[in-house]
Image: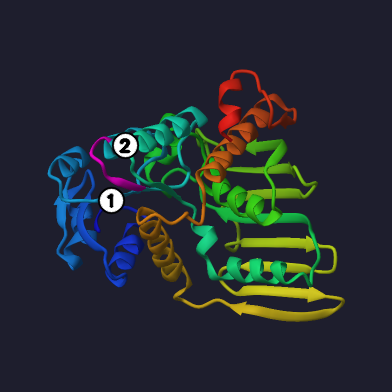
Amino acid sequence: MRLGIIGAGAVAVLHAEGAAIIDGIELSAVCDLKADIAAKVADPWGAAVYTDYRQMLDDDVVDAVVINTPHSLHKEMVLAAAAHGVHVLVEKPMATTVADCVAMEEACAAAHVVMVVGLIQHFMAEKLALRAVLASGKLGAVLLVHDYRSTDYRPGTRAGWFFDKAISGGGAFINIGAHCLDRSIWIGGAQAVRVTAATLNRFGAKVETDGSMEVLLANGVQVRITIVSDTPRNVDEMLVVCENGTVIVDPRSGTFVEIDGKHTQVHASTGDDIQNAFTAQLQDFAAAVAGAAPTVDGAHAKHVVEVVLAAYESAESGHPVQLGGSRAGDVSLQGAL
């Protein structure tokens, strides 16, 4: 499978390294608006460099692409790839509106190409260790999830498009919050039915820099997500409260279980965990192209976008937002979720 990468920033190197590791995948092209940035990812593997993704598609040098670009561009790029018969792994969030998610799905289905959304949490070793503990039954049912992540949304600390809502779709919620919602809903075991949220705009930023969400899942599990910018130390921690015990998960240290006063570490994080996760995700994508069901289905990826948008609606209105069934202005989309 000849793989192209559109957008050479952030995690592009991790995708490229994964392609080099997996038999049957060759990194054939990298596209970025800045040729020198694309070259940094492409050159170690002898891949072609492009500054126009449409030209890359027209040149028929790829069978599949990873779309690693600003959020609002995902739809047009997925539709272009589908029109060329090219399979797609699109980074989270899937899009900035549910309508765009649906259009992407429909275009790929009509073109008979595979689209998978890159929700990396499902491949992280510490999260898989958590899932294994839950599956053992020792902890009983999940009752509550608290997810706390730090970030940095001070203007100047990241590319300018992150602060342009028309391009990014929002700030910390749609970027970092998408990861938190993905993993919390996944671990919680059901879709969200109610969201209450509040946001903060600090540092003169034009998008939210901090915020919190309270999310009720259909099975009664309570989820609390807190995202804070510019903290004294970096934080990325999930606390899962179950009937018989608790679990703390941190990608920098591992997975820790407490049952009746007994403390156990079931995973110790290593420096290879992140690359291993991206490699596993790419393997999963290749398997989906070959006909297997992907680890993360489109309905879940689309639901994450829906919940992010509901959080924005709640933060703006000051009231909880109900999900599921018919919602004003989105009635036709509910059956697809």
Which of the image's four quarters has the N terminus? bottom left
Q: Position of residue 336 (x, y in %)?
A: 56, 32
Front residue of 232 and 194: 194
In the image, residue 57 sits, relative to residue 130, either above or below, namely above
Seen at 21% across and 41% down, the residue is 53
- State the scheme by which the image is colored: rainbow
Question: Mark 2 to mark 1: distance in Å?
Answer: 13 Å
Numbered disc in front, either 2 or 1: 2
Q: Is residue 54 left or right of residue 114?
A: left
| Residue closest to the far right | 260
Q: Amino acid at mark 1?
A: Ala
Residue 257 appears at what percent x and percent y?
A: 74, 74
Query: Which residue in the protein does label 2 denote?
Result: 111
Q: Nearer the viewer, residue 258 or 200?
A: 258
Is residue 201 in view?
A: no
Q: Which residues are magenta?
A: 83-88
Amino acid of disc 2: Ala
Where residue 64 is drawn, which disc sits there? 1
Residue 71 position in % (x across, y down): 41, 39
Q: Residues within 10 Å of mark 2 (few under 14, many from 20)?
A: some
Instruction: Judge the density around disc 1: few (<14), some (14-19), many (≥20) Cα neighbours within 10 Å.
Output: many
Q: In the rendered view, tell whether residue 96 sits above or below residue 228.
A: above
